[in-house]
Image: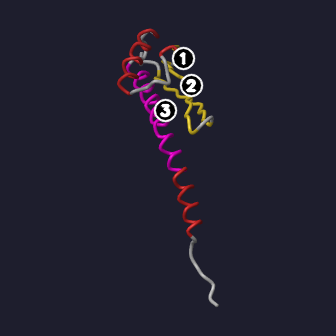
Amino acid sequence: MRKQNGLSLVTMLLGAIVLGLALLLVIQLIPVYTEYFSVKSVLKQLANEQAGAPPAEIRESFVKRASIQDISSVKPDDLDITQDANGTSISVTYQAKVHLVANVSLLFDFSAQAQHGAPAQ
């Protein structure tokens, strides 16, 4: 009698379930990381274009850019703006929560920073 080779129907179904769950997780994580990269991009733009501007003006500019980039996890008051002899530094630390199923969620801690050197004298 020959030994059978290959996958059984149950093994294929279990593999499909695992693959489906992994795909579901990836699909739910894409918006969180897309927003994070948008936050980094906006901070970099602000640091370069608004260097030396008052913090209130930088926050106002952030609000406008955040609405265009669809950033909802970071508010203007969350920005840490430091201006000194070394230039302008803007940083933010925030959390993003992704609901998976029932009472299961993932919590991500993000931190982004951008800096622009002091203007040439």
Q: Residue 7's quadrant in the figure?
A: bottom right
Q: Residue 62's quadrant in the figure?
A: top left
The secondary element bearing badge 1 is classed as strand
Per the image, the residue denoted by label 2 is 94
Closer mark to the observer between disc 2 and disc 1:
2
Task: Measure the alpha-carbon separation of dots 3 and 2.
Answer: 10 Å
Residue 77 horizontal/vertical position (percent): 51, 13
Per the image, the residue denoted by label 3 is 36
Closer mark to the observer between disc 1 and disc 3:
3
Query: Which residue is at 64% across, 90% downward?
Result: 1
Query: Which residue is at 58% across, 71% downward?
Result: 8
17 vs 32: above or below: below
Residue 19 horizontal/vertical position (percent): 53, 55
Local crowd size for mark 2, using a 10 Å CA cut-off: few (<14), some (14–19), many (≥20): some
First in sequence: mark 3 vs mark 2:
3
Q: Is residue 31 magenta?
A: yes
Query: Which residue is at 46% across, 28% downward?
Result: 39
Q: Residue furthest bottom?
A: 1
Front-lying residue, 19 or 42: 19
Disc 2 marks a residue whose amino acid type is Tyr
Q: Which mark is residue 14?
A: none
- Residue interval drawn in magenta: 22-49
| In-image side of 94 versus 66 (left or right) | right
